[in-house]
Structure formats: structure tokens, C-alpha cells
Image (cartoon, helix red, strand yellow):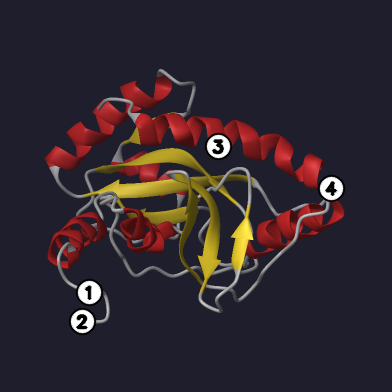
Amino acid sequence: LEAGVTFDLCLESLQRYKTLEQELQMPFGFGEMGVLGYFTREEERQTALARKEFYRQFGFPYEVLSPQQVRQKEPALRLTEELGGAYYTQWVMDPLRLVYASFRSGVERGVDWHSHTKVRGFAREGGRVCGVETEGGETLYAGKIVVAAGAWARELMATLGLDLPQYYIQGACMVMERSSLLLKHTVTTFTSPRIAMERGASQALEHTPWEQ
């Protein structure tokens, strides 16, 4: 495992979130949660051992557990084929409250919000981007333009003749209250088929419109 740009951004984001609630003066549920990922194959156990060394370089707790330790962590689990598990920390928040807190803070600082306003391209002067053009025909000017369109960033940057290697992947966001279920942690399989699915979908969508 090697640290890359995405990992560096995650580290910076983590430090930013630790002080953001105080800055925005509104809690959005940022905190730690234990995750237990159980594995059933030896190759998964070896991957967990490698991850343990990697994450500990950066001060993140990461444990590789035996089957007995897995059951100690989660006595209610009834697994018959597990070889053990990995226990680590993830950080959680309420994204809806975070968005609202950012919106409220921006309004207090004089930010003009244009909700439900689709950007269809960029305004340019002298070879420099100076604003954005909306679907309604309005041009909004600014000294700096930040593209934070997520999955739609590639479509937007194409209007500048740039091919951004970012593709659509359908996802979902769920916010729920903590329950009184028997499980004490987030429990998941160690290897998720989602990664392979996302890579395959990205390749398939590279030259195919999302609507198709």
C-alpha cells in the first residue's frame, strides 16, 4: 500500500472536520465509529496485515483479530466460516446538517446562493475563465471559479475542452439515528464487490452517456 493524492486529501480533510463544527457554530455529528470487517479467505487476512502496518504509520488504530476476538467484539454474530477480522475506525457525520451549516455560515458572510441553478458552461475573457453561464442564460462573474460538481465535473469541464477522468457511479446517502440493536459496531465483509463493480461501470461508461 502506498499513500497517494487521495489519501493526502483524506488526512487534510480529517483535520479540517475536527475544527469545522466550532467554526460553523453548529454540530453536524462528526465523530468516530468502530468498524469490524470479517474475512473468510487467507488472502484477505494477508491484506489486513498489510493495511495494519500502513495505517499505523499515520497513527490510525487498526487491529487484525482472530475468530475468537471477532466474537468478543460482537457476541451476537453467528459466523461459521470466518478466519478473523479487521477492526478499525471510520469517521461519520450527518451530511445534511453539514450542508445546512455551511449554507448558514455563507449567508452570514455575504455569500449569494443560487440554488436549483444549473451551470451549462463558463464565461471567458482574454483566454481566462471569469465566470459561469447558467441554463437560464445568466452569467455569474467571480475572481476565482471552483468546480465542485462531483460526478458531473467531467461533463462540465468538457465545455473547456478538458477531458477529466471522472465517471458517474450511482450512490446513495442515508442518515439514521443510532439504534439499540445487538451489534455494537458497523459490521461488514472485508472485501466488497462494490470496488470491482465501480471500476467496471466506469470503464463501460467512459464513452457512453449516463442516460443510456
Residue that badge 1 annotates: 209
Q: Distance of mark 3 from mark 2, alpha carbons?
A: 35 Å
- Contact? badges 3 and 2 (CB < 8 Å): no
Q: Tag 3: residue type? A: Ser
- The image quadrant where one finds the N terminus is top left
Residue most extreme to the top: 57
Describe residue 200's horizontal placement relative to residue 4 as left or right. left
Q: Tag 4: residue type? A: Gln
Callout 1 secondary element: loop
Nearer the observer, disc 1 or disc 4?
Answer: 1
- Residue 125: % across, % down: 50, 49
Residue that badge 4 annotates: 25
Q: Distance of mark 4 from mark 3, alpha carbons?
A: 18 Å
Residue that badge 2 annotates: 212
On residue 72, the disc is none
Callout 3 secondary element: helix
Q: Distance of mark 3 from mark 1, alpha carbons?
A: 32 Å
The numbered mark, 4 or 3, whose residue comes first in the sequence reads 3
Residue that badge 3 annotates: 13
